Amino acid sequence: MKKNNQNLKVSIICPIFNADNYICHTINSIINQTYQNFEIIIIDGGSSDSTLSLLEGYKNNIKSLISEPDNGMYDALVKGFKLATGDIMCYLNAGDFLYPHAF
């Protein structure tokens, strides 16, 4: 069955580590999109700051959250893409953000 653009799910993988200064801005830029068929997957490399506490406020918006030591950003991305179920996949680093109507 062919999907039209309005049915395509977007998977957004966010590899993060000690991102408490930026993560809220990043997550807010995703959840404030007008297009709402997306999933957020957070792969945290074992943050020791308040990143995980801040993410608690977004638990209803985050499909998957893994927090464990990893071998860097690319290892985190591989973990995230394996969990993704979207038709379109992208990643957004902590501190990056999406402009309104980005997708």
Image: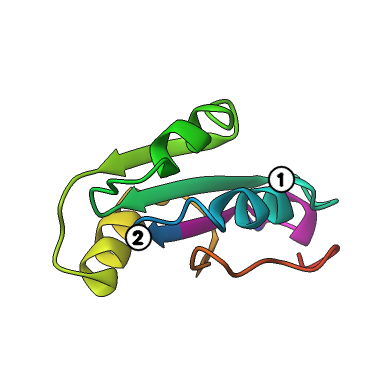
Q: Quadrant of residue 50?
A: top left
Residue at 41% in and 48% down: 42
Q: Which residues are magenta?
A: 3-13
Counting from the top left corner in percent of width and height, residue 10 is at 60, 56
Nearer to us in this view, 92 or 55: 55
Is 99 displayed left or right of 55 in the figure?
Answer: right
Q: Is 1 in front, or is 6? A: 6
Q: Left of 95 or right of it: where is 77?
A: left
Q: Nearer the viewer, mark 2 or mark 1?
A: 1
Name above or below for residue 8 compared with residue 78: above
Q: Hey, which quadrant is residue 87 in on the image? A: bottom right
Q: Is residue 73 left or right of residue 36?
A: left
The answer to if 14 sits in the magenta stretch is no
Q: Which residue is mark 1?
A: 31
Task: Find numbered disc 1 in the image and state the secondary structure of the residue it sits on.
Answer: helix
Q: Position of residue 35 (x, y in %)?
A: 80, 51
Residue picked out by circle 2: 81
